[in-house]
Amino acid sequence: MNKGIETYQENTITTQGQGRIIVMLYEGAVKFLKQAIPEMQAGNHEAKSKYLNKAEDIINELSTVLDMEAGGQIATNLRALYTFMIRQLHEANLKNEPAKLEEVIKLLEELNQSWKAIAG
């Protein structure tokens, strides 16, 4: 009986888990970018960099795990969007422009809404 429960839990994590993990990654990136904005505005470079690096790591991970063969045009478009986001983060960091972070946050939140619908 316990083996059946374990198998069920494993399958639940595997099937629903991937979409839910992506949702969590988007939420984490948004959270870190929102934390970076006041640090950027306050001139706290160390904290700003910490949050930007965490958000960038998440976006890079999302890009890295794309299955370019199976994902076709959608994966190609997502890769281009993630690359754009990373460039925006770099520019925001160099030029101290919170508006660029807001733009990335908006994109991540829109993508996250789609993934929430898929993940259920």
Image: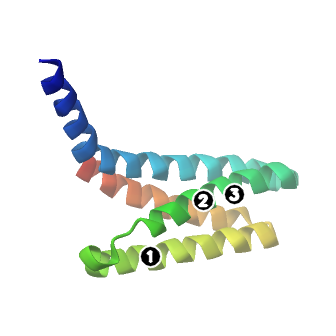
Q: Nearer the observer, disc 3 or disc 2?
A: 2
Res 120 seen here = no
Q: Label 1, secondary structure: give it.
A: helix
* Neighbourhood count class around disc 1 (C-alpha, 10 Å): few under 14, some 14–19, many 20 upward: many
Which is more toward the observer, 31 or 55? Answer: 55
Left or right: where 47 falls relative to 19: right
Q: Amino acid at mark 1?
A: Arg
- Looking at the rendered structure, the secondary structure element under dot 3 is helix
Q: Residues within 10 Å of mark 2 (few under 14, many from 20)?
A: some
Amino acid under disc 3? Leu
Mark found first going from the N terminus, 3 or 2: 3
Q: Is residue 110 visible?
A: yes
CB atoms at circles 3 and 2 under 8 Å apart?
A: no
For the residue pair 30 and 21, the one nearer the viewer reads as 21
In space, the residues marked 2 and 1 are separated at their CA atoms by 14 Å
Badge 3 is on which residue? 52
Tell me which residue sits at (17%, 31%) in the image. Answer: 8
The percent coordinates of residue 12 (x first, y second) are: 22, 37
Nearest the camera: 11 or 115? Answer: 11
Name the residue rendered at 71%, 62% in the picture: 98
Q: Locate the C terminus by quadrant.
A: top left
Quick one: label 1 or label 3, which is nearer the N terminus? 3
Q: Is residue 52 left or right of residue 110?
A: right
Q: Please, is residue 119 above or below residue 105 in the view?
A: above
Q: Which residue is mark 1?
A: 79
Q: Position of residue 31 (x, y in %)?
A: 58, 46
Badge 2 or badge 1: first in the primary sequence? 2
